[in-house]
């Protein structure tokens, strides 16, 4: 691995961190060089900038090779693609499977109500009272 890749990775950039035992302040190699008068402040800031580890899931290590991930932006997706077509055929499929359970009782109920209404109208009419008036 080339040294430039190691420095760009964000891992232990220079010689890592070490602790100055005098007052317990943790410092990196750039801070130590500044204290020793070997580096200017602006260069020290550049050395410290490469120490950022990154957020969760991106801790500055080298990317793993052979891992491929694909993505699609939200405005390019079609979340309702084919729903209208699928909905029509799904409704027909469900209806055709349930019609034999629902239709015969509905037809029998309709015929029974139709007979009962006609019978009630006949019994409450003049000819029905004359024919069945004495039996009630």
Image: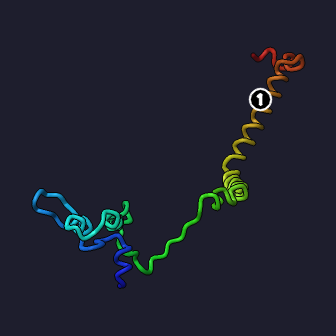
Image location of residue 44, percent across then percent down: 31, 65
- Residue for point 75% across, 42% down: 107
- 130 sits to left or right of 8: right
- Residue for point 80% across, 27% down: 117
Image location of residue 59, percent across then percent down: 35, 66
Mark 1, residue position: 116
- Residue for point 37% across, 73% down: 9
Is there any visible trace of residue 100 in the rendered image? no
Is there any visible trace of residue 48 in the rendered image? yes
- Residue for point 49% across, 76% down: 68
- 82 sits to left or right of 26: right
Which quadrant of the view contains residue 16?
A: bottom left
> Total label count?
1
Applied colour scheme = rainbow
| Secondary structure category for the residue under label 1 | helix
Residue 4 versus residue 105 in the image, above or below: below
Residue 91 versus residue 27 in the image, above or below: above
Which quadrant, please, contains the C terminus?
top right
Depth check, front residue: 64 or 27:
27
Depth check, front residue: 131 or 84:
84
- 74 sits to left or right of 29: right
Depth check, front residue: 78 or 101:
78
Image location of residue 45, percent across then percent down: 33, 63
Which quadrant of the view contains residue 66?
A: bottom left
Q: Residue furthest left?
A: 22
Which quadrant, please, contains the N terminus?
bottom left
Please tell me how crowded label 1 is: few (under 14), some (14-19), or many (20+) other residues with Cα within 10 Å. Answer: few
Q: Residue furthest right?
A: 127
Which quadrant of the view contains residue 58?
A: bottom left
Image location of residue 20, percent across then percent down: 14, 63
């Amino acid at each position: 691995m080339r040294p430039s890749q190691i420095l760009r990775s964000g891992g232990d950039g220079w010689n890592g961190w070490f602790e100055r035992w005098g007052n317990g302040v943790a410092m990196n190699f750039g801070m130590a060089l500044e204290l020793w008068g070997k580096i200017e402040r602006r260069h020290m800031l550049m050395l410290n900038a490469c120490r950022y580890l990154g957020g969760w899931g991106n801790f500055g290590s080298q990317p793993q090779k052979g891992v491929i991930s694909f993505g699609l932006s939200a405005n390019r997706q079609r979340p309702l693609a084919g729903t209208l077509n699928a909905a029509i055929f799904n409704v027909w499929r469900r209806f055709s499977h349930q019609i034999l359970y629902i239709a015969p009782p509905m037809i029998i109920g309709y015929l029974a109500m139709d007979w009962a209404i006609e019978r009630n109208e006949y019994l409450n009419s003049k000819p029905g009272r004359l024919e069945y008036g004495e039996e009630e």
